[in-house]
Amino acid sequence: MNIRTQRDRREAGRKILNFYFPEGYIGANIDQLLQYTSDDRFVRPIQKTVQLISKYTPIYFYLFSYSSDYGIKTLHKLIRDSRLTSGVSHLEEQFYMWKRHDLEDLNPTGFDKLIARRLMRIWSNFIKTRNPTPFRDQLLQEYIWPTVTSQSNITYMQIDKNLSLQQNYRHKQMEFWESVYEHGYSRLIEMGHITGNRYNPT
């Protein structure tokens, strides 16, 4: 984030600290830190990119939220102590799409295999037709996936044990970031401005 003055740096840092870390310091709660990092590094920039690009080309937006022992064990084999909290990690859906010879000892469940089949159908449809659901398909629970057509109400497909169409993922958090940027902060805040055990305004 392009913060030009010490005053603006302090103001931006306090806003973010108060919103994500109400105790007043960072490190006591891993979930809070992960929520901040996820929103700052992934959710906000991805949603902003979707808003901008959808003006010019069809965009199909999705959230992968299927969590299983297969995903957890795969993560643990690839990254030690990777599952420190609940939820699904960045790119975890790829574990269900690509076979890895170093992970052949893991045994996916019936639901894991169903999720894998759905992901492969969605992506193969998109590759062939530029549409993940060009027709109603029992495997995809008869959904016709709409493109993003509104800048304020972003529709996305949530991929879990069941598919579902949702709107405005983490809406409260995205409104917060919009309010921060409206005050003239034009780039992402660097972790160095609010890092360590306590807020550091330097």
Image: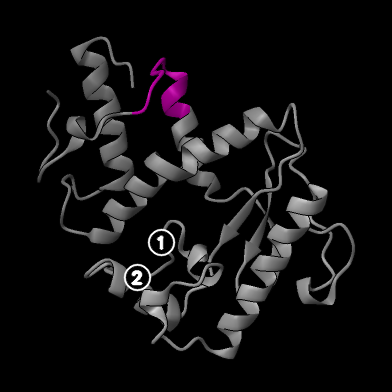
Q: Residue at x 79, y 53 (%)?
A: 128
Q: Amino acid at mark 1?
A: Ser
In this figure, what is the number of numbered marks? 2
- Furthest residue toward front: 101
- Furthest residue toward right: 135
Disc 2 crowd rating (10 Å Cα; few below 14, some 14-19, many 20+) is some
**Magenta segment, principal secondary structure?**
loop
| Of 108 and 56, the residue lying toward us | 108
Residue under numbered circle 2: 75
Q: Is residue 123 above or below residue 42?
A: below
Q: State the image coordinates of residue 40 (x, y, percent, origin top left).
A: 38, 40
Going from N to C along the chain, the mark reached first, 1 or 2, is 2
Instruction: Check disc 1 and report its element: helix, strand or loop.
Output: loop
Residue under numbered circle 1: 89
Q: Residue at x 65, y 66 (%)?
A: 119
Q: Is residue 114 above or below residue 199?
A: below
| Of 74 and 99, the residue lying toward us | 99
Location of the C terminus by quadrant is top left
Q: State the image coordinates of residue 73 (x, y, percent, origin top left).
A: 35, 79
User: Marks 1 and 2: CB-CB under 8 Å?
Assistant: yes
Decide if residue 161 is in sight here. no
Residue range highlighted in magenta: 179-188
Q: Is residue 4 above or below residue 198?
A: above
Q: Amino acid at mark 2?
A: Leu
Label 1 to label 2: alpha-carbon separation = 9 Å
Q: Is residue 124 above or below residue 181?
A: below
Report the side of 32 relative to 106 (left or right): left
